[in-house]
Amino acid sequence: MRRSEDIESLLREPRVFDPPPDFAAGAKVRDLETYRREHRRSLEDPEGFWGEKASALLWYRPWDRVLEWQPPHARWFAGGLTNLAANCLDRHLPDRAGKTAILWEGEPGETRTLTYGELHAEVCRFANVLRAQGVGAGDRVAIYMPMVPELPVAMLACARIGAVHSVVFGGFSAEALRDRVLDAQAKLVVTADGGFRRGAVVPLKAAVDDALRGETPVERVIVLRRVGDGARLRPGRDRWWHELAAAAPAECEAAPVEAEHPLFILYTSGTTGKPKGIVHTTGGYMVGCHLTAGLVFDLRETDVYWCTADAGWVTGHSYVVYGPLLNGATTVLYEGAPNHPEPDRFWRIVERHRVSVFYTAPTAIRAFVKWGEEWPARHDLTSLRLLGSVGEPINPAAWTWYHRVLGGGRCPIVDTWWQTETGAIMITPFPGATPTKPGSATLPFYGVDAEVVDDAGEPVDDPSRGGLLVIRRPWPSMLRTIHGDPGRYVEQYWSRFADRGWYVTGDGAHRDAEGYFWILGRLDDVLNVAGHRLGTMEIESAIVSHPSVAEAAVVGRRDELKGQAVVAFVTLEGHAQARPDLAQELREHVVRQIGAIARPDEVRFTPGLPKTRSGKIMRRLLQDVAEGRDLGDTTTLEDRQIVEELRGE
Ligand code: WT7
């Protein structure tokens, strides 16, 4: 853990971009005064504010109380009965049955659209399938699929019957899937024979078979035929999606569930080896997704909205599936890689489907910059009216490129800060109201009481100093616990300022003279690689599980494209030799344990690791070494020699 005094605010970006007047004129929130007034009201009267926002949605029974807060445990809309799938689908049927809900493009180029009416029918059918296979309210269903329409169908079908989904990103390995299935105690897995990525088949079903070896709680595997490469079903356990769905009725009453009924578990990296199963519940999450998606993306009836995230991450949950559907929008899903068959694939999609709102990650934007302006220049991107960014701080150079090249200088950019734990966007511009500064996520969303504080909890007013980003009150879409580990929930997020009931985000930030938030990145031992959170401990455990390895320490090195690259320092068991092919073997070992996203960019062998007297690995120092910086203060080093060897001195 880094101390907050050490955080230097590095960004100094003087430019300000006002919302374009014609955009502001038609926007839901048109000026900064309106934003400030509403934000103030949301903090002065949170129950009034959130009660009003929740009333826009469908409830079978109203809540007794908007918020019950016994720090750090919140109950939002307690006593209320609702259903998220009914709010995403049934609520729209009177007006939007024929409107496109999902617009899908497969990597090979085929497209499919599902209207709200059709999506409703598919979800009902699959909800009936799940029930017929023995899934009831509260049961966990693991979903391990490519980005095809059946992925949101499976999520919504779970929500419809009160089952809890746990979507596992299709890029995770069999081992990672196994850990998550076991931790969640899933009784059913939904998968596909495979998916397409860069022209190749990702063998998802084979990974499921591997993940489910031996005894597991999984009774049933439902397999979607996506690639048709002859995947074999295991008798007794596996069933084809199309066979089950064909036999299921297209009507299924949505089950009214308590507002605090669990909706999903989603795993994210923390500072220990084991990923945390973040638990979100129904009512508050729904209200948060609905309001943020509507206002931050300024969604209008005619928008074609595309968030490029995979549904396996929280961005996909909240802003590919639930947020846009709650708003009755058209949401685009794309299965494959951004540069397949060529680096203009995204711009082909924007042009072909007349995408108007586009939401992606800085790491992707930096890749577009690298591939060159000629790729977007080949396409008509004038349908775009709003651009968004999420996942890591966006560097001003990438921001201005995004603004100029993709946005043609006319589209506002919303740089949205949030986390798996927050469920919905927390710090963000309102595109018609907030002047933006490249690199700043700007100001808190309604109901969000964000502050940058020092270790004593005092606000840091000095714009040149950084501190800890905290949220000083509960918000509807907040996480409720960590699955199976309620103690860790309290310890990880709420213990530092326990007496005040503040949520500690784990990010460092600073505020400028106008109160704008500038996110500096994680303060804990968590890397942000290509917009994905990876725990250093998680990668270290994977490396150490290799028989040749004695000890490992993983740090992030600044990387132009990915934000951070993974560098592993490894000491070997006595018998093992530090051969180059062993480095390669260890990299692939990590891929098998976690997935390609965690593959170390560099493996450095070392006879020892620098440690403090108490035996703690000195990661800061290793990071200095990895980034080729001068050594800092090493007086506390047990063995200075080790560092010199690491640096090749
Ligand atoms: C961490 C959360 C929330 C969706 C994707 C990632 C970093 C996220 C921003 C942003 C600077 C950002 C933070 C945060 N982050 N958005 N706009 N500016 N940093 O979800 O995997 O839970 O990671 O991503 O460090 O804590 P996640």
Image (cartoon, helix red, strand yellow):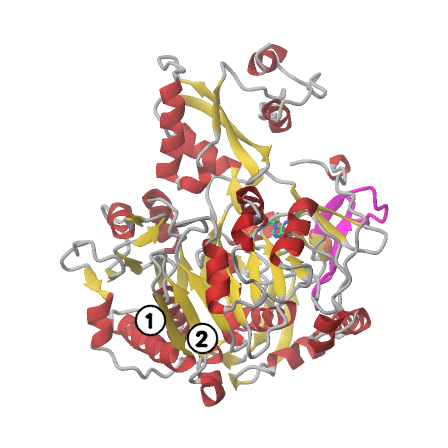
> Is residue 388 or residue 1 the one in the foreground?
388
> Label 2: which residue?
101
Q: Tell me which amino acid carries mark 1.
A: Gly
Q: Residue at x 22, y 46 (%)?
A: 214
| Category of crowding for the residue at label 2, using alpha-carbon neighbours closer than 10 angstroms: few (below 14), some (14–19), many (at least 20) | many
Q: Main secondary structure of the magenta part?
A: loop
Element under label 1? loop
> Is residue 214 or residue 518 the one in the foreground?
518
What are the residue bounds of the magenta stretch? 443-469
Percent from the top left, x then y, of residue 510?
A: 76, 47
Say which of marks 1 and 2 sits in front.
Answer: 2
Element under label 2? strand
Q: Tell me which amino acid carries mark 2.
A: Ala
| 460 within the magenta span | yes
Percent from the top left, x then y, of residue 242?
A: 23, 69
Q: CA distance from mark 1 to mark 2?
A: 27 Å
